[in-house]
Amino acid sequence: MTTWKEILKDEIPPEMGKLIDTYEAQMELRKQGKLDEKVFAEARLRKGVYGQRYDNGQRHDGVRTRDLAFPSGEAVKGPDTLWDAPGMQRIKIPYGGLTAEQLEVLSELADEYSDGILHITTRQDIQLHYVHIDDTPDLMRRLAAVGITTQEACGNSVRNITACTLAGVCHDEVFDVSPYADAMTQFLLNHDDVQDFGRKFKVAFSGCAGHACGLVMMHDLGLLAQTREIDGITVRGFTVYVGGGLGTVPHQAKVLAEFCTEEELLPLTQAVARVFARLGEKKNRNRARIKFLVSKLGIEEFRREVEEELKIVPHDNRHTAYIDTLSEFTYKPAKAGMALNGATLREGFVEWYRTNVYRQVQSGYSTITLNTPLGDFTAQQGFQLANIARRYVGDNIRLSVEQNVILRWVADADLPAIYRDLCSIGLGDANAGAIVDITACPGTDTCKLGIASSRGLTAELRTRLLEKINQLPDAVRELKIKVSGCFNSCGQHHVADIGFFGNSRRSGNHKMPHFQVVLGGQWQQNAGSYGLAVGAVPARRVPEVLEALTERYVAERGEGENFQTWVKDLGRKEIKAMLQPYMKLPSFEEKPGYFSDWGDSRVYTIDDIGVGECAGEVVSLFSMEISKAESTQFEALIALDDGDYRLADEQAYKAMVMAARALVRTKNLDVGDDYDIIVDEFRSRFYDTELIYDRFAKGKFARYLFKRHEGLPDRINEDYAHQIIDETQLFIENVHTAEQRINGVIVG
Amino acid sequence: MTIVPKRLGVKFSLKQQPTLQPEDILPIFQRWIQDHSIDGMLIDVIDYKHVPDGPGIVLIADEFDLAYDLSDGEIGLYYVRKRELPDTLKEALRLVISRALAAARALEAEAPGDIEFYYRSAKISFLDRIHYRNEPEIFEAIRSIMTETLGGIFGINVEVARQYDDPRAVFALRCTAESANFDIEALIARLDASLQSA
């Protein structure tokens, strides 16, 4: 049977192909019980392969919790995560940039491996839900063939790097941050210094301070474009912010460096990563984000640590090589810019133009936002959208953190035609960025941590608001609503005018879904301030609460007063008093409807909440690296079975070097990839010191590595391949044993 | 061309617009999970009715997805078999049609007279672009096998045509029986019997 691996072998970059092959080998090892479930879980997460609700094999059906008897029984892909349970595949789309071809492939994958829906996340990723893990290697290969990776989309690593969707076309930006986001993505992807974090690490770029787009203040690392005059020359650089974040405990980022030049950007980022890896919390995942480290040390001490680290960051040509390629980062519009030319305008165009069209800095061009409900679109819409892109904008597609699709470089003269075409595929709704364009995380639909239905509530609010959108005053239409299914803030409720996050309350013997109301967050100024929680109301009463809040805001606001100021002036006490009537808990008998969530007819329960994988598994760097050596050794075995003895030898040798490197890196993080250096370091640190010595075999297993490193034998045949694979196995076991024995000495 | 596709789907459309709205289907599917109303390991229900021309309300099972589907401008019931497909295309078609018919009959029973499917025609989707690209050559290669197999299943002549022209779209066939002169219950029973004996 033909496979995607064969078909795409010449189209996948070799390095990406190897990473996927390694992951596939790790899957096989896990199936055979030869790879620890925690180690595999972290390896899986770092490929963007995430768990989903009910993957522990239990689901409350509204009456009782039932076991889900998956065919592979008790086989697991992580702690309490059954192998056959459907999962989510997160796909990194750096700074949200997509080509038409990439959009088509994503659509194909949604059709064939998911439920036909592509979901845009608040980090400009695409997520596919209900994916079976067995399908993920081919899914990744098909993505890799068009230049998309899922590498480090989840897990304790650098997540998708985000940037303003208007970067490069904006009137107010200092300069286009897109090529810098692109360069940093490439630099940090799979970098040795980002493999040993206690938690995830999120980076964002913004082109200006005033707007929201980049949201640098709520990021682990935020880069805000700046220029400075140095020796009479205008120099590009960034103000560097560190330690921001939402989550349960939101932090505003602190300034790490007022100005770092293009040359300093990547080494400085690398130094921050190394400090985070070295000093960040590893055991308590609830305090493992960098914001806690910055808070604990204080920004001055953190800055000092980074400056010290910067002195020992190894030289890397890539630190500055990207600067020479910045000028190659250009945009190719599909058509020449041209003004609107009096074409007949379809009904609805004027309103759509008002809310969804941004006049670019480039004359004759506009950027348009496709109001994508709940961030979802179908595979069929994806294909049609690719057609529209090719016809009007070329490869200038982006995804936004507000879960919309953005088309840039539309010739103004084409706006009526593109509006017509978008309407024909159901993506011509006006009011992008307005109150109906609500952001929501997956919540209880698919997330293991979800407490209440963020998507169900969002769909309901959207429907109700759309019915009266034309009657709403502008002050209300312009408000931002964001909804999270729990306190973890994936829906970014802290930075909305009106935010909600899911929780629950007890009434009698039943739990009732609730939403905490968070008011007055600031989206502008790069998420400049966070909202205040003012009280929890039953989920079913949220629409009434929204109405009460907005009506009072309209009635009482002063001339030009915005929502944040109004909330601040009104005060938490008064707001709480306003919400009080809605906070009353009826009994189940009085209001049975209150005991089911939006978009879910089941009687509400919190029994389905599982253990989240958002934080990843805190697995040691050694465990992650040795598991890769083991999967490479497994690939050697496959090559042996295929009769390819030369490849079997190459893979076995590589596996030994990888195992040695895993051990060396517990002493020297910067050992690099050079085989000679790795073997020398291994010899001096572990062989000469006898730390690697086996109790009985002494240094015999280590000498397998040295022997192979000295050169190949004259003849490579089946016997030889067998032998080196066996030796590799023994060597890896020896490294494992040694690491366990000397762990306290070399790691602590 | 007799390779069993990775996923195989069948959609039966409604005869007419029902008074029942998509949101009314959600509690029905939830209850089906509680009651084990249809075969399979039923997992969850997901609501996509906000997506224009989308999958509507989807009952997710381990072996299949069952959507109260709003795509192609036709409301219908779309059964997609994801796993545990038989080894031959003929048996796979029998299985998928049998299960889709059973689910459709179950849904009709929830709203008698309001939800009625048009069984004379169906869309059959081959969700497997490695073996079934949406190309005329693939259609020609499979056409006679499909008419023969479907004719055998329905007991009357069945015409097949490509559903979509777009080469990127899923390879799907519009299958239309030459008359509506067949007994659905008997057909389901016959398919079940043949599946059990296989």
Image (cartoon, coloured by chain):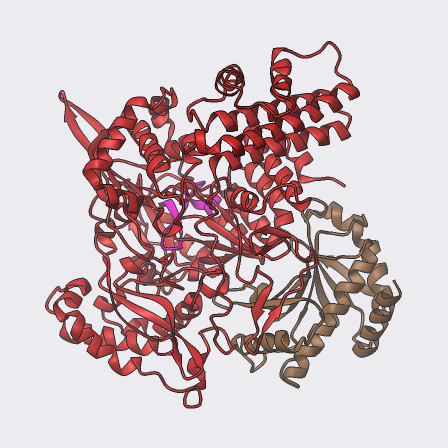
Is residue B32 inside the magenta stretch?
no
* Nearer to the camera, A195 or A100: A195
Is residue A396 inside the magenta stretch?
yes
Rendered view: B174 above or below A695: below
Q: Residue furthest left?
A: A559
Q: Position of residue A561 (x, y in %)?
A: 13, 64
Q: Quadrant of the C terminus of chain A?
A: top left
* Nearer to the camera, A371 or A726: A726
User: Does residue A225 appear in this view?
Assistant: no
| Residue at screen point 44% across, 53% down | A120
| Residue at screen point 33% across, 22% down | A320
Q: Position of residue A477 (x, y in %)?
A: 27, 66
* Nearer to the camera, A300 or A256: A300
User: Does residue A516 appear in this view?
Assistant: yes
Q: Quadrant of the N terminus of chain A?
A: top right
Name chain B's colour.
brown
Q: Seen in the image, is A660 located left or right of residue A93?
A: right
Query: Which quadrant of the figure has residue A257?
Result: top left
Q: Position of residue A699 (x, y in %)?
A: 60, 19
| Residue at screen point 47% across, 48% down | A616
Q: Residue furthest front?
A: A695
Q: Seen in the image, is B174 located left or right of residue A188?
A: right
Q: Position of residue A369 (x, y in %)?
A: 36, 53
Chain coloured red in this rendering: A
* Nearer to the camera, B18 or B63: B63
Rendered view: A604 above or below A260: below
- Residue numbers of the magenta segment: A389-410
Q: Residue furthest top?
A: A714
Q: Residue furthest bottom?
A: A590
Rendered view: B63 above or below A128: below
